Image (tube, helix red, strand yellow):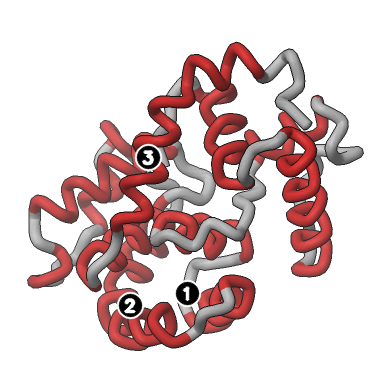
Amino acid sequence: MKLPAILEPHYQHFAGAISQRLAELSALKDEREVFYEFCYCICTPQSKARHAWHVEQQLRQLNFYEQGFDPTPLLANPKHYIRFHRTKAARLLSLRERLSDIAEAIRSITDSHQLRLWVVENVAGFGMKEASHVLRNVGRFELAILDRHILRNLARLGAIRSEEPPRSRSQYELIENKFRIFATHCGVELQVLDLLLWAIETGEVLK
């Protein structure tokens, strides 16, 4: 079992950055860090990941966790515009009110798949993809983030038949399992292949 030849040079290029990023994710998270990872993942849908990252960094600098304020102008800034900024700003404020429940769920629900369902059902703005993303970012590495970059590459590599996004929870779990099997065949862990395929599409290992 080894990486397909088409992936090997990319892996050699990004391996160091991937290892560093996974180490950072493993080292998380106190409640404050968990909060900002959720903020980031609220901002990412239909927006550029780099824009969401800039917003997260500014929320940190302005102590949004401690103070709370209307983040709408920040999300609407053309330099790092977040689509549906009013809706997402409201969700960021709502997130502060649910943080203790979220932190308790992360502590008490040891099964990552069950925790993902809890997030989907209890935190506004999180579907299966976003819940998988935020939980990966707090160190739950058993879950796949099936965004368009990942789906496109899995289809190109023959791991799945179509790059169409899943339209139900069961479809998501089916594709996720195929992704997991493909990673095993490649001889790498799921989270490593996830970051590698994303980096191939975007040119960087972000989060």
Q: Residue 57 placed where, x, y %?
A: 20, 46
Q: Which mark is residue 21?
A: 3
Q: Circle 2 sits on which residue?
A: 94
Q: Residue furthest front?
A: 1
Q: Quadrant of the N terminus?
A: top right
User: Which one is in front in this view, the residue at disc 1 or the one at disc 3?
Assistant: 3
User: Which one is in front in this view, the residue at disc 3 or the one at disc 2?
Assistant: 3
Q: Which secondary structure, mark 1?
A: loop
Q: Residues within 10 Å of mark 1 (few under 14, many from 20)?
A: some
Q: Circle 1 sits on which residue?
A: 124
In the rendered view, does 184 fall on the left or right side of 196? Answer: right
Q: Residues within 10 Å of mark 2 (few under 14, many from 20)?
A: few
Above or below, 65 against 28 in this view is: below
* Quadrant assignment, res 159: top right
Q: Give, as a three-letter code, the residue at label 2.
A: Ser
Above or below, 152 against 41 in this view is: above
Label 1 to label 3, Cα distance in Å?
27 Å
Q: Residue 17 placed where, x, y %?
A: 39, 28
User: Residue at point 37% right, 55% down?
Assistant: 26
Q: Quadrant of the C terminus?
A: top left
Q: Give, as a three-letter code, the residue at label 3.
A: Arg
Of the image marks 3 and 2, the number of the one nearer the N terminus: 3
Above or below, 79 against 58 in this view is: above
In the rendered view, does 122 fall on the left or right side of 77? Answer: right
* Quadrant assignment, res 205: top left
Of the image marks 1 and 2, the number of the one nearer the N terminus: 2
Q: Give, as a three-letter code, the residue at label 1.
A: Ala
**Residue nearest the viewer, comparing 103 with 96:** 103
**Residue nearest the viewer, comparing 100 with 180:** 180
